[in-house]
Image (spheres, grey):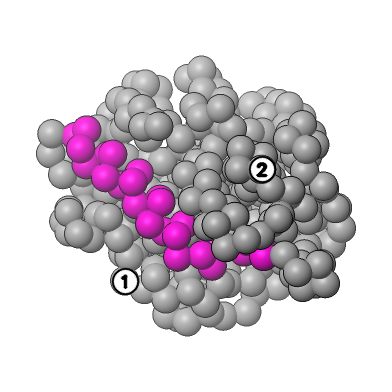
Amino acid sequence: MTTPLETAPPSLAQGRPLWLKREDVHELGAFKWRAALPVVERYRDEGARGVVTSSTGNHGVATSWAARRLGLAAVVFAPAGASRSKLARLEQLDADVRVGGADVDEAKEAGKAYARGHGLPFFEDGAEPLQYEAYGAIGDEILDRLEEAPAAIVVPVGNGALLGGIGRALGRRSPSTLRVGVAAKEAPVMALSFEARRPVESDRCATIADGLAVRVAIPYAVDVLNHAADRMLLVSEREIAEGVAAFDRAGIRAEAAAGAGLAAVSQLDETERPIVVVVTGGNIDEELLARCRDEPGSFPD
């Protein structure tokens, strides 16, 4: 499936040549399907009867979707406080959902222990090289669609695999394009690791953007981003909420990670060449969407 690349509505573009890569239009509502299918298919071909993973939602949904398509069982460890709508989607996909842990990294440790104990592969989001290859297709689709090389492509960053894959594709085909990652100020570990050029520790992981809520950097992802990204920007919770609200006013239901990408555009230099924001997904709980729309000032800046 090739997802649409659209010119942004004027209310979002604010006079800039802004384009939106609509990964939210897939049946799962997010980009994760691109990588989940080849990774789970490899597990099946290696003889696995099931797969275990940890997720705040979208990765688990995509893994469960891929597993069901390929005839495998899926066990998903999710942190307490995970999106209710995403948990419900996991159950619809027949996943065995285990909820526990303060964040996705604590859930990951429980998932790894379960996988070891049951002889199953653990799909660690961001640690599988096949993911990066799969996400590179997004960069290729953008370049195939535009008539001129974009000035920048803006990618929300959780574990870094999406930016890593897109960034590699751009490096091969469009080296003049700025590869920009966006992390939440309240979950800055990947931005800190990018600046340090090595995994660093962070005790902050309290963002409304569950897709960006990473506390422990994955070494492989940091290594890839050292070569596949040019800049890493940070946005506040209020800016993320304002991004979600702006999308909503334009008729696009975007989750908070996508709102972060839109929010970061104002930090880029003016340009006449296209700027592309990857709209990573649209799976957002109604309560959070309403608060972002009606009370964005209630979030910290």
The quadrant of the picture occupied by the N terminus is top left
Q: Position of residue 156 (x, y in %)?
A: 48, 50
Badge 1 is on which residue?
227
Q: Amino acid at mark 2?
A: Gly
Q: Amino acid at mark 1?
A: His
Whether residue 191 is visible here, answered yes or no, is no
Badge 2 is on which residue?
71
Residues packed near mark 1 inside 10 Å, few (<14), some (14 to 19) or many (20 plus): few
Q: Position of residue 21 (x, y in %)?
A: 37, 35
Q: Is residue 155 above or below residue 222?
A: above
Front position in the image: 91 or 248: 91
Q: Nearer the viewer, mark 1 or mark 2?
A: 2
Answer left or right for 84 relative to 6: right
**Label located before the other in sequence (1 or 2):** 2
Q: Which residues are magenta?
A: 121-146
Q: Residue at x 45, y 65 (%)?
A: 129
| Membership of 134 in magenta stretch | yes
Answer left or right for 260 relative to 64: left
| Membership of 108 in magenta stretch | no
Give the overall secondary structure of the magenta segment.
Answer: helix
Q: Residue at x 64, y 26 (%)?
A: 293
